[in-house]
Image (cartoon, rainbow, N blue to C red):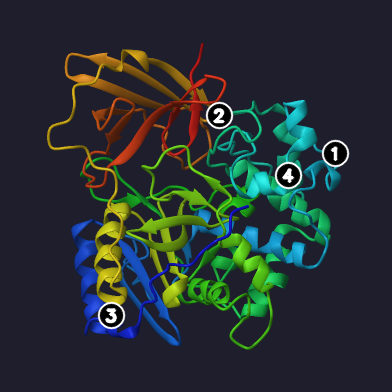
Amino acid sequence: MPPWHPCPTRLTRSAMSTTALDRDHWSRRLADLATRHRVPGAALGVAQGAETLEVAVGVTNVETGVDVTTDTLFQIGSVSKVWTASLAMALVDGGKLDLDEPVVSYLPELVLVDHEMTARVTMRHLLTHTSGIDGDFFHDTGRGDDCVEQYVAALATVPANHPLGATWSYCNAGYILAGRVIEKLTGQVWDAALRDVLVTPLGLDHTVTLPEEALLHRAAVGHVHEGDEPPRRAQVWVLPRSAGPAGLIASTVGDVLTFARMHLSDGVAADGTRVLTAQSVAAMQTEQVRLPHPYSKSDSWGLGWCRLDWNGHRLVGHDGGTIGQFSFLRVLPDLDLAVVLLTNGGQALDLYHELFRELFRDVAGVEMAAPVTPPVEPPAVDVSAHAGRYQRTGVRFEVWQDEAGPRLRMISTDTTPGLDRAPKDYALVPVTENVFAVRDPGAETWSPVVFYELADGTPYLHFGRATPKLA
């Protein structure tokens, strides 16, 4: 794998403005922007070297009006994947796991729908979202300690999304399978391994994985909305327990910053306890695979971490989304800087873009990369070459041209309680011949929809995940 190089420009504290880590200033900005973007509650944490800033605004639940504090637990969603990847690297450090050994060596009972995938898929494939397993298979296998084991057994019925290693497609199922490997090698359920390897050594008193543990703390609930309507409390609090390794950690901004600081300190906790080797920390930040197009927030993926290029400065991070809760973590190793934002609904992505752009500019002198945006005068594009149906587990897309221009319809086929299943229609605004921009009603941030082909010529649509075209 190519070596990871830190940002070539060494930033200094002199680059910071007078607003850097000013609690009153960032508390006001968080409150103002959360109100503007209709986010019910949010907590912001910033760690730079030994300095820490934590602020919170809003309410945990619009129906109860309980205030959000910096000790409020939010679901961090898929940011949990970095924690699961860290567990895997601890096993690598202990000589129990080889990332390039077929997973079936550790799980002889593994059966996937594709025989080659079963025989050859490795932990590196799982941690880099290149396995080809269809990723959004949310399957409730109950609350028992065997829930992850039972989930992995059910993968035998899940169709492949793409051939092993043929492209990059975000994959929750792959991380749950990785969690099962961790269970097999530690002799513990994923929750217990997380506690013993990360939570306890790092002293994380407000990090949990189960709802009965969250009830012992002040905890945020998710909120949902359609268009410009006010956020309303979600009817379901959490995803099935089987999704744990992919996204069921609940935590606070302080605990997430402590976890990030371990990664900024070459794997050493604040009290000097070594959690990971420096080699494993570096490997997690090393480019493992590039994304199939340059229009996403990240340009490449490490082990667990997504990698971002913000105008020449290399960051790692991850986002998370559960049922009405959204999280954002960005780490700038060259400045020993980590920033986390936890929210419980509203236009959280718009809040992230506006707040992080301002914060990184003022605190670090770093200009955040701009998201994809259609040109003022979009080119005239005939979408007929891309028209048709695209389908993967949990969702189907329809692409067509009407009188107003190219259109995209997203139809959820997932039945998981709490997830949004309403069909969504988008205008596909052309950026180039194969790249389009879409955004939800009421949102300010655009997202890319990219049409591309695999090496064998198979057509795919990429909208967060790779989705093959139906014949």
Image height of 470 relative to 435, above or below: above
First in sequence: mark 4 or mark 1?
Answer: 1
Image height of 151 relative to 434, above or below: below
Q: Secondary structure at mark 2?
A: loop
* Residue topped by disc 1: 109
Circles 4, 2 touching at the beta carbon (< 8 Å): no
What kind of residue is marked 4? Thr
* Residue topped by disc 3: 15
Image height of 135 relative to 369, above or below: above
What kind of residue is marked 2? Thr
* Residue topped by disc 4: 122
Circles 3, 2 touching at the beta carbon (< 8 Å): no
Tell me where residue 214 appears, x and y as whole percent: 55, 66
Q: 10 Å neighbourhood of mark 1: few (<14), some, or many (≥20)?
A: few
In this picture, residue 425 sits left or right of residue 317: left
In this picture, residue 341 sits left or right of residue 100: left
* Residue topped by disc 2: 393
Q: Secondary structure at mark 1?
A: loop
First in sequence: mark 1 or mark 3?
Answer: 3
Viewer can see residue 7: yes
